[in-house]
Image (cartoon, grey):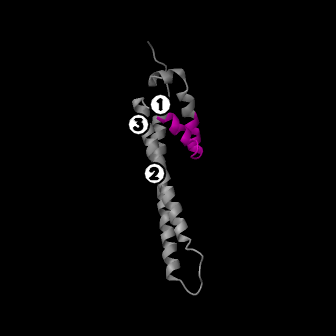
Amino acid sequence: MQTKPNNLNTFRILYLVKGILTICFSLFFIFYAGMGLFFNTAIERSQQDVEMPFNFGWLFVAIGIIGIIACVSIGILNLLTSKYLKEIKNYNFIFAIAIVNCLTGVLGIVLGVFTLIELTKPEIKELFGK
């Protein structure tokens, strides 16, 4: 019995690359949070007679921390998806992460859509035991 060729190995490599790039992008948010801490200390040291309603440095820190958490978690999920594609298991997890990737920019949209197209093929469902 001859098996049909599929693109799962290509998607595995692309999810690996996207996971690494997403984790590297979290460095931007580390810089962003650090910039917020710098603003925070600069404003506190220059407190003169002017009262500010709030220290906006904390806003930068909060956005930076949320961005770090989001980027690292999406990156780890992409790395797990790459692992599961190699092992050909967890069909529903791969399907869900492909949908999540459609929300993460141009590379995520392209990767997510093509993964969803590939996962809905009958021969791929057979590989996963669906």
Residue 98 placed where, x, y %? Answer: 53, 37
Q: Is residue 99 above or below residue 2?
A: below
Mark sitting on residue 91:
1
Q: Secondary structure at mark 1?
A: helix
Taking depth in this image into account, of 31 and 90 the one nearest to the observer is: 90
First along the sequence among labels 2 and 3? 2
Q: Is residue 95 magenta?
A: yes
Residue drawn 42% across and 34% down?
A: 84
What amino acid is found at the position of numbered circle 3 in the picture? Lys
Label 1 vs label 3, nearer the camera: 1
Residue type at tag 1 = Tyr
Chief secondary structure of the magenta span? helix
- Magenta segment boundaries in residue numbering: 93-113
Q: Residues within 10 Å of mark 3 (few under 14, many from 20)?
A: some
Amino acid type of the residue that numbered disc 2 sits on in the rendered structure: Val
According to the image, label 3 marks what residue? 83
How many other residues sit within 10 Å of disc 1, few (<14), some (14-19) or many (≥20)? some
Secondary structure at badge 3 equals helix
